[in-house]
Every structure is written in structure tokens, then in C-alpha cells.
Image: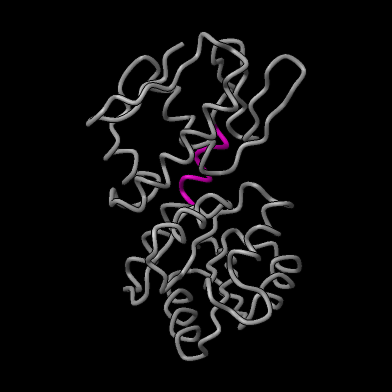
């Protein structure tokens, strides 16, 4: 019998929330539906879900604010944003604060289900990864921690996955389009801007070892050199 997976869904439009809930529950998910950010936070704390689907524009507590609060407690739980926003800065903000994926309304239920399954699979596979050496750093991928001597740097879910792929392709070019599709779901302009932000953040966290570089190979992607 397939495992039932708990998901917290926060959607303030009752009809859309019910449609999503019913659709997901035909696919072995148990959906705990909230109509505002405060209800969603309470459900997160009581249910211990495997994944969160958060509408960005909600009463009492918006999706971005809610995600920031949850990331203070849990750096690993996958978060998908549902949004009508399409401004570049909104998309980048969503990923920067710890979102793992986003869907612009309107969207198809099949696409949401595929993205949920991809994130859950990605989270499960990370548990089998070993600690990796990057120059003088130790990268504990499952725990999402980068350590230099006695100092540890916690990584967000997306930072950890991006660094993992850079390390696995060390001294080789990591194809920009491929990694965008794998980690962001699409290689469009908005996602590309978001990835650039994460690359900058990783460079700052790796700056203690001057033998390490993340090089931008224009037109192709990035290369981790160490």
C-alpha cells in the first residue's frame, strides 16, 4: 500500500483550495487546508507535513512571511509558492527566502502534482549523500551545512542542492539550462535571475578558501574550480 503523505495547503480562495485538495487526495496525499497564513502555521506545527504549498497573497500572514518563519525552524521542508505575481523581484524574493518552486496562476493540477513529486523525490535522495570535501571546506549535504575549520554555515534547501551539483561536476561546466530545469523546473529569465542570486550567496560562503572559485562560463553555465 502506498504511503500517505501529509501536505499543508494554504489558499484563501475556498473553491480553488477545495479543488486542489480533492485532486491531491486522489494521489495518496493527505491535504490539510488553511485559508490564511496563521492557520497554515498552526497546521505546520501540529501536522509535521512533508511539503508546503503556499499561496503568496493571503490574509493575516502572506506566503512569503510564513515561509520566512518556517525556515527559521526547518531549512529542509520543500515549499511551493502559488502566485499571480510575475514581477522578477517577486519571483527572486520567493526563492531567496527559501522557496523551492513556484507556480503562476492559473496552473494545471498535473503540473502541480509533478512538481510536488519531484521535490519529495529530491528530498528523499539527499539523505543518502555523503559529506563532500570542497577545498578546505566540508559540505554535509544531508544536513545542509558547510563547515570551514570551526565555523559552520547553514545552507538553504536550494543552496545545498545547487552546491551539490557544482561539487559533483567539479572542474567541469555545469550546464545552466539543465540545472535550471532540474532545480527550478524551467530555464526562463526569472529562474535564471534567481539562480544568479544563489550563486552569489555561495561564493560569499566559500570565500574563506581562496583556491575555490565559481566561474561564470558565459553562454554555458557555471564551473566550480578548486
Give the percent coordinates (x, y) of residue 179: 34, 38
Q: Residue furthest bottom?
A: 15
- Lateral position of residue 99 relative to residue 67, left or right: left
The picture quadrant where one finds residue 65 is bottom right
Residue 90 x %, y %: 46, 61
Q: Is residue 180 magenta?
A: no
Front residue of 126/151: it is 151
Q: Is residue 101 above or below residue 83?
A: above
Task: Decide if residue 88 is on the left or right side of residue 161.
Answer: left
Q: Is residue 90 above or below residue 62?
A: above
Q: Report the residue at 60% width, 58% height from top.
A: 50
Q: Between 110 and 28, which is closer to the camera in this rendering?
A: 110
Report whether 223 appears left or right of 226: left
Number of marks present in the image shown: 0
* Span highlighted in magenta in the image: 120-128
Residue shown at the point (34%, 77%) measured from the top left: 106
| Residue under the point 28% across and 31% down | 175
Does the magenta-highlighted stretch encompass residue 126?
yes
Say above or below: 34 vs 190. below
Toward the left, the furthest residue is 219
Amino acid at each position: 500500500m502506498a504511503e500517505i503523505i501529509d501536505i499543508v495547503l494554504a489558499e484563501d480562495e475556498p473553491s480553488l483550495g477545495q479543488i486542489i485538495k480533492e485532486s491531491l487526495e486522489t494521489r495518496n496525499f493527505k491535504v490539510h487546508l488553511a485559508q490564511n497564513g496563521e492557520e497554515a502555521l498552526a497546521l505546520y506545527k501540529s501536522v509535521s507535513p512533508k511539503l508546503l504549498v503556499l499561496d503568496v497573497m493571503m490574509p493575516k500572514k502572506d506566503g512569503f512571511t510564513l515561509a520566512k518563519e518556517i525556515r527559521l525552524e526547518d531549512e529542509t521542508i520543500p515549499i511551493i509558492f502559488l502566485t499571480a505575481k510575475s514581477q522578477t523581484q517577486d519571483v527572486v524574493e520567493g526563492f531567496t527566502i527559501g522557496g523551492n518552486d513556484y507556480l503562476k496562476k492559473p496552473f494545471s493540477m498535473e503540473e502541480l502534482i509533478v512538481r510536488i513529486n519531484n521535490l519529495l523525490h529530491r528530498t528523499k535522495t539527499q539523505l543518502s549523500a555523503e559529506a563532500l570535501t570542497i577545498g578546505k571546506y566540508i559540505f554535509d549535504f544531508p544536513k545542509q551545512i558547510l563547515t570551514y575549520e570551526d565555523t559552520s554555515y547553514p545552507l538553504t534547501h536550494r543552496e545545498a542542492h545547487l552546491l551539490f551539483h557544482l561539487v559533483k561536476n567539479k572542474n567541469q561546466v555545469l550546464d545552466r539550462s539543465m540545472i535550471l530545469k532540474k532545480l527550478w523546473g524551467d530555464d526562463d529569465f526569472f529562474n535564471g535571475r534567481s539562480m544568479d542570486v544563489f550563486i552569489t550567496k555561495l561564493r560569499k560562503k566559500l570565500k574563506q578558501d581562496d583556491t575555490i572559485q565559481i566561474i561564470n562560463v558565459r553562454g554555458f553555465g557555471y564551473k566550480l574550480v578548486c
